[in-house]
């Protein structure tokens, strides 16, 4: 089938048959529509906290030592990094579950070093399994063949296509036995290289041949009476034959589910191997994907327009119930420039999934290779991201619990404001943080839409009163514009260079008072990686409220984790006049008050597990 969008507005469905089940989600507002959709397809999994740190990758490090040098350079400059990744060059002959014993001999030591520094390791896996190794020399293929776990041709022989290692068979993830074989392969590899997450690629499934080494047989499955407008005008172009046989059905009925089924097998394997929340990023996706994995937006180019396109890509996947999403920061193919990469790192620091990734044979584009000014700008914006981790993590909890979006289009919060409907150069985190990135070269300002109301500069607390208008904002190369919506309270934290270090640091609560001097916010806190913490009750949930010049922190659910962290500072934006005194639980506290109406109370030293009140008079 294919669906055409008409300007009417209307949808035209063209299909050659089959059963059409329509679900109509009535909202009435956009966010309710998406919540209702996710009630059907399933809410997204809660990611581990480290998944929300900064990730670094490239194809073509060439060796584990070169990968390690990059990690050390990042640490040397104290640039935040949680995940180090490798692309297919770590493998022996591009074969899954193998290691290049020459160039990547030190990989186990690198992974051990990452773990020692509170960092994680993620590597790529493809579903195409090399079929040309001498019998007995490559267990994944021999065993998959013995157990009958690959896609077969309509004649019942393994379908052979071509991917990175050369000729390959394709794992049939519709077969539960394949999940067991996949787990065993991962267990064998984990014994050498204790990875923390997995990146599953090429899982459309992608094939360098059309169909198979023998093409595809004649018939309606491979040559339907109507072929939608697909690449190569053929269902088998750059993939496998629609007539291929899988355990559950023919590939024709399962094609779009391939990446989802692989993600499900991979998530289950990671849980069995590590006993913690799985972290998976998949290229191919289908409704329900968010329950098992996140997504990156695929191979992009190091161009300004690709950076622009990443925002609608991000927001679309938010609507699909896959909140853990981002694009390759600074661009995958082609050569980036220092200015493009700086601006892209600023935008990318606000992708829910933030990874800088590069192709082989291009100059390096990790933050350490640029001029001191660019490097510092990149480091600063990553520190800003890390300071916002408590807020971001709480947004992911709300996504997991009820299907809220994390990266959110403006029209979700302001559906009555027609001006927000087609904004795709800005977005929100949750309901309260507005991100206005620079998306073009050679400028030191940016024009963005500011919805009606009071907004506060994230860095200074100065207020902007908007009637709902486009506003020009100063944006020198080292600056990303961030604004906090009135009436919200953001839990932030003193940032460290990893999520592990950051989560032990004192919290700073930023209160953005509404025009009637009220505000609300919340914080979800757990150990950051255990399975089902919410479902098992192993978490803390704290609600923050301001009304009539009194800030209150109320513990709605408590856990041991919350005793390990303190609330250090309260910054209150929009306090109309300087208070004469500030009382913490009735005791006077020193404070500072600035002309831009920011009241700050430091050294609170309150445990997160203690409720408290703070009053200004």
Image (cartoon, rainbow, N blue to C red):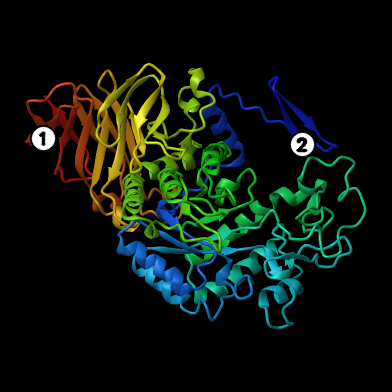
**Quadrant where the N terminus lies?**
top right
Q: Residue at x 74, y 76 (%)?
A: 132
Residue 600 shows in the view: yes
Residue 23 location (% of width, % of height): 68, 30
In this rendering, the answer to whether 589 lies above or below 249 is above
In this rendering, the answer to whether 78 lies above or below 294 is below
The mark nearer the N terminus, 2 or 1, is 2
Contact between labelled residues 1 and 2, with CB atoms less than 8 Å apart: no
Q: Residue at x 10, y 32 (%)?
A: 583
Q: Residues within 10 Å of mark 2 (few under 14, many from 20)?
A: few
Q: Which mark is residue 2?
A: 2
Element type where label 1 sits in the image: loop
Q: Residues within 10 Å of mark 1 (few under 14, many from 20)?
A: some
Residue 597 location (% of width, % of height): 19, 26
**Quadrant where the C terminus lies?**
top left
- Toward the viewer: 577 or 244? 577
Q: CA distance from mark 2 to mark 1?
A: 62 Å
């Amino acid at each position: 089938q294919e669906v055409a969008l008409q300007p009417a507005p209307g949808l035209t469905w063209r299909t050659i048959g089959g059963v059409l089940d329509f679900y109509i989600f009535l909202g009435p507002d956009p966010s309710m529509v998406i919540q209702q959709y996710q009630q059907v397809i399933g809410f997204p999994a809660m990611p581990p906290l480290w998944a929300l740190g900064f990730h670094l990758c490239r194809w073509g490090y060439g060796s584990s030592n070169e990968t390690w040098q990059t990690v050390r350079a990042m640490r040397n400059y104290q640039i935040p990094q949680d995940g180090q990744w490798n692309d297919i060059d770590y493998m022996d002959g591009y074969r899954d579950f193998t290691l290049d014993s020459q160039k990547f001999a030190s990989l186990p030591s690198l992974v051990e070093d990452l773990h020692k520094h509170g960092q994680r390791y993620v590597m790529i896996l493809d579903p195409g399994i090399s079929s040309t190794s001498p019998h007995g020399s490559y267990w994944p293929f021999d065993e998959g063949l013995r157990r009958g776990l690959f896609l077969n041709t309509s004649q019942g022989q393994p379908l052979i296509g071509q991917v990175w290692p050369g000729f390959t068979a394709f794992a049939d993830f519709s077969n539960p036995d394949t999940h067991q074989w996949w787990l065993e392969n991962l267990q064998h590899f984990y014994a050498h290289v204790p990875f923390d997450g997995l990146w599953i690629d090429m899982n459309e499934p992608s094939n360098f041949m059309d169909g198979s080494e023998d093409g595809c047989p004649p018939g309606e499955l491979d040559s339907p009476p109507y072929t939608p407008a697909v690449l190569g005008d053929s269902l088998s172009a750059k993939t496998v034959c629609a007539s291929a046989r899988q355990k559950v059905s023919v590939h024709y009925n399962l094609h779009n589910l391939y990446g989802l089924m692989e993600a499900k097998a991979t998530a289950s394997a990671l849980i069995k191997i590590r006993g913690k929340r799985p972290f998976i990023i998949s290229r191919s996706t289908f409704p329900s994907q968010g329950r098992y994995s996140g997504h990156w937006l695929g191979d992009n180019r190091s161009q300004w327009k690709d950076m622009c396109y990443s925002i609608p890509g991000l927001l679309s996947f938010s609507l699909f119930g896959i909140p853990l999403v981002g694009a390759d920061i600074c661009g995958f193919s082609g050569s980036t420039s220092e200015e493009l990469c700086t601006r892209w790192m600023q935008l990318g620091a606000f992708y829910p999934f933030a990874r800088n990734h590069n192709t082989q044979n291009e100059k390096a584009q990790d933050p350490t290779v640029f001029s001191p000014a660019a490097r510092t700008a990149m480091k600063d914006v990553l520190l800003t991201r890390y300071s916002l981790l408590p807020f971001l993590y709480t947004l992911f909890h709300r996504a997991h619990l009820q299907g809220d979006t994390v990266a959110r289009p403006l029209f979700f919060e302001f559906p009555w404001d027609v001006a927000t409907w087609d904004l795709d150069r800005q977005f929100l985190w949750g309901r309260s943080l507005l991100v206005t990135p620079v998306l073009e070269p050679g400028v030191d300002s940016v024009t963005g839409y500011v919805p009606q109301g009071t907004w506060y500069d994230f860095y200074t607390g100065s207020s902007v009163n908007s009637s709902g208008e486009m506003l020009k904002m100063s944006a020198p190369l080292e600056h990303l514009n961030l604004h906090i919506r009135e009436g919200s309270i953001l839990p932030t934290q003193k940032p460290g260079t990893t999520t592990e270090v950051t989560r032990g640091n004192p919290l700073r609560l930023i209160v953005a008072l509404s025009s009637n001097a009220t505000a609300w916010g919340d914080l979800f806190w757990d150990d950051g990686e255990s399975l089902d913490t919410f479902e098992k009750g192993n978490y803390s949930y704290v609600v923050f409220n301001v009304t009539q010049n009194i800030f209150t922190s109320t513990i709605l659910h408590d856990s041991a984790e919350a005793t390990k962290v303190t609330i250090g500072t309260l910054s209150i934006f929009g306090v109309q006049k300087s208070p004469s005194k500030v009382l913490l639980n009735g005791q006077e506290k020193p404070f500072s008050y600035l002309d831009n109406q920011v009241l700050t109370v430091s050294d609170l030293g309150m445990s997160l597990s203690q409720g408290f009140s703070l009053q200004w008079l």
